[in-house]
């Protein structure tokens, strides 16, 4: 069955309609509504990876004797200019926050570093200092917290560079860390 067509409008009806509504001004063509920006995708895999890191780091065997007392730490992520690390070592970045790991065991220090860096990133902080100590009392095992800090920072995607602090900022007992902005 074909759909029925509406009855055509008679000339009298059309005239009456035009008389009833009066003069009409056509509307200007409307511009399309601005497109809403797409929400940023959730980095679910990144979140899962970050959540798994603490357990993996504790499970991994590491040798703190690989880093010696008094040894300077230094790291620059691939793809960044060496000038950035030189500036960091010269103290040309303003330290915006810091944390002291003294008297912590490795598991506690690891959790504290993760929370500290996540909070710094959340607050838009780009340069922080982590005081890990020189490890002078670590006996033959070497500087445990220093080695742990080095290992954690090298594995974090939000760390651009880090270097041992200048002597007046803690020297080899602390690192200054530059985070992605």
Image (tube, rainbow, N blue to C red):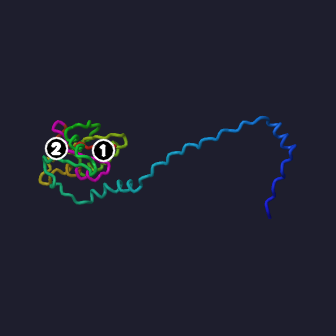
Report the residue at 35% width, 40% height from top.
Answer: 124
Query: What element does badge 2 sit on?
Result: helix
> Quick check: can you spot residue 54?
yes
Q: Is residue 152 visible?
A: no
**Percent position of residue 106, x then y:** 24, 51
In the depicted view, which residue is nearer to us: 160 or 172?
A: 160
* Furthest residue toward right: 12
Q: CA distance from mark 1 to mark 2?
A: 20 Å
Residue bearing mark 1: 179
Q: Is residue 58 left or right of residue 1?
A: left
Sequence-wise, the earlier of marks 1 and 2 is 2
Secondary structure category for the residue under label 1: strand
The magenta-colored residue range is 150-168
Residue 23, given in percent of the width and then of the height, sits at 77, 35
Picture residue at 38% right of the left edge, 54% below the top: 46
Q: Answer with the quarter of the image where residue 21 lies.
A: top right
Question: Which residue in the structure is indicated by mark 2?
Answer: 172
């Amino acid at each position: 069955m074909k759909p029925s067509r509406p009855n055509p409008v008679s000339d009298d009806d059309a005239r009456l309609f035009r008389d009833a509504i009066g003069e009409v001004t056509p509307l200007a063509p409307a511009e399309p509504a601005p497109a809403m920006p797409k929400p940023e995708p959730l980095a679910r895999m990144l979140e899962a990876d970050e959540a798994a890191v603490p357990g993996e780091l504790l499970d991994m065997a590491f040798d703190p004797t690989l880093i010696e007392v008094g040894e300077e730490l230094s790291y620059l992520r691939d793809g960044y200019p060496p000038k950035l690390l030189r500036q960091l070592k010269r103290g040309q970045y303003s330290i915006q926050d810091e944390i002291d790991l003294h008297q912590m065991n490795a598991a506690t220090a690891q959790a504290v570093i993760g929370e500290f860096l996540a909070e710094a990133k959340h607050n838009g902080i780009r340069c922080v200092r982590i005081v890990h100590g020189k490890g002078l009392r670590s006996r033959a095992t070497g500087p445990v917290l220093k080695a742990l800090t080095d290992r954690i920072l090298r594995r974090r995607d939000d760390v651009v560079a880090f270097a041992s602090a200048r002597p007046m900022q803690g020297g080899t007992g602390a690192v200054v860390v530059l985070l992605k902005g």
